[in-house]
Image: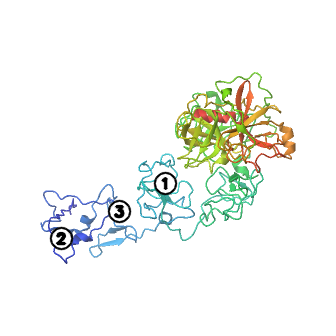
Amino acid sequence: MQPVLGVLLTLAVALGSGHRSPLNDFQRLRATELLAVPVDPPPLLPEQGSSEQCAQRCAASPACRFLPSPRNGLEENYCRNPDRDKRGPWCYTVDPNIRHQSCGIKKCEDAVCMTCNGEEYRGTVDRTESGTECQRWDLQHPHKHPYHPDKYPDKGLDDNYCRNPDSSERPWCYTTDPGREREYCRIRLCTEKRLRPLNVTTGCFRGKGEGYRGRVNVTVSGIPCQRWDAQTPHRHHFTPEKYPCNDLQENYCRNPDGSEAPWCFTARPTIRVAFCFHIRRCPDELGAQECYHGHGERYHGHVSKTRKGITCQPWAAQAPHVPQISPVTHPEAHLEENYCRNPDNDSHGPWCYTMDPRTPFDYCAIKPCSGSTVPSILENADTVTFEQCGRRDERLQQKGRIVGGQPGNSPWTVSIRNRAGMHFCGGSLVKEQWVISTRQCFSSCDADLAGYEVQLGTLFKDPGPGDPNQQTIPITRIVCGPSESQLVMLKLARPAALNRRVALICLPPERYVVPAGTICEIAGWGETRGTADGSVLNVARLPVLAHNECNAALRGRLKESELCTAPLRAGVGACEGDYGGPLACLTADCWVLEGVIIPSRVCARTDQPALFIRVSLYVDWIHKVMKMG
């Protein structure tokens, strides 16, 4: 039998009233089409006739109803389901007595239902709960978005099917309606709510800690965690009902959103989220038999995963990252396979380029060998010189009346703003296109910052449209620092224009320790508690406290990665909205970013030192991030 090439459906014949046309029985089928009949009709349809007669003959012919096409996959005699039969794939049989029959192929449970929050769902639902068709993931119209299939190859972003690439409550999609950006999809839970293969642990964690099921319930600062089933003091959507596979019990630390490590909402209204205290990484991930001396320049072991569990990219490869260091450029560095190395003498130890397109490089899961010496810490900077940074027009410094601060001139301090244009954190401009802030200002290292921006060059928290000095630049990327650092770097959509109102702050020498008693500045648009004008940038001065004195005041809890300032009787210090901003100290006639403001239990305490991230420990990492772009 010759294959039928098409069906001639002439719609010129008017139908009599009261008669149902056979054309009505034709349903719209996905990936099928009706083609025009050739001039010479094929043998299967020898008779000419009305459109109704043509439709009757076509309805009885399987070859006519389902024409083979590259789009519908009807090749050879393979089982298919072109009409979406509920029984699954079927075919026409070669038995004259049996026209068609189901093939009895077992249904793939994961393709038609979801487990947990549907991150592993790979079905073909392509409409939202409201019935709106989904936008293709590889398109940026009508809605621009960051979830392109090439950037997230493991998220199954095929066609316009509903997916959950950001660990939301359940699968969703961007819609084809310009007025509705994204909506959830209606996908049923599988009969058996199976746990994802998470390699569950209790006393330690692997990877990013998604499988951690221990009972630690305090943050790194010792703040108790908020219960997951509570909505005070912080409202959130990570409830046990919505995330049944993440074991969100009590107020135990968990990682339901793929963050860097287990975390929790805190019981303090002023601090929303924080990582958890003293949850160690499992020994088998740390490379129990592997360690390095010094900075690890001579490490030639075979660890090939980062401390976050990401597989390393081979040094000779060109994807997903184009390396600036390779076996060709550094032949003496033993850059074999994808093993962790330290070819550039990074002070944080062996590292590698990663296979995650979002993470250019990371440090490896290798610990220093016992007895390995830490490089001596620079005690002074008398011989240090800086490039064009850290200078300001002192004539702009106002004397008037952060808590206990006064309106001031800090041209490297930026305001970080959410999609609604509201200020929520501070940051420091260290390069024309890079800002440093703190991890605690953001929900995760994979946070979607579309619509977020920084504001520079203005004294006012909410400047008017006519402010000639204001610059507003979108944020395009967030890069989280080493896990203990709590630092983040934000890449801007374009370089900031430097002028007398916008300037770069200098980075300190590697591992430099600010001398005790040095008077430094903090700046921000945060809460003033009525002690200053909250509508303008406030600057306050604080003296640096010696490391041993601060450690004694904190009963031995001070970390090497922390810097502190002495408390003042007047109650001067950072508060909510200032977090992420600079602690700037004058060194060699230039202002240097020595610390980054982090949340504290009480604003401007008069009885305890204020803590900051010690930036000098992470200068290598900062330069590497900016260099790799």
Using the numbered discs, state the Cα–Cα distance from disc 3 to disc 2 in whole angstroms.
31 Å
**Circle nearer the N terminus (1, 3):** 3
In screen coordinates, is 363 left or right of 554? Answer: left
Quadrant in which the C terminus is drawn: top right
- The mark that comes first in sequence, 3 or 2, is 2
In the depicted structure, whether residue 415 falls above or below residue 514: below
Q: Are marks 1 and 3 in contact (CB under 8 Å)?
A: no
Mark 1 vs mark 3: in front:
1
Going 14% across and 61% down the picture, which residue do you hit?
Answer: 41
Q: Which residue was labeled with disc 1?
A: 156
Q: Compute the Cα span from label 2 to label 1.
A: 44 Å
Q: Position of residue 24 (x, y in %)?
A: 25, 70
Mark 2 against mark 1, which lies toward the viewer? 2
Kind of residue sitting beneath label 2: Glu
Identify the amino acid type marked 3: Tyr
Q: Quadrant of residue 552?
A: top right
Does 241 appear above or below 364?
below
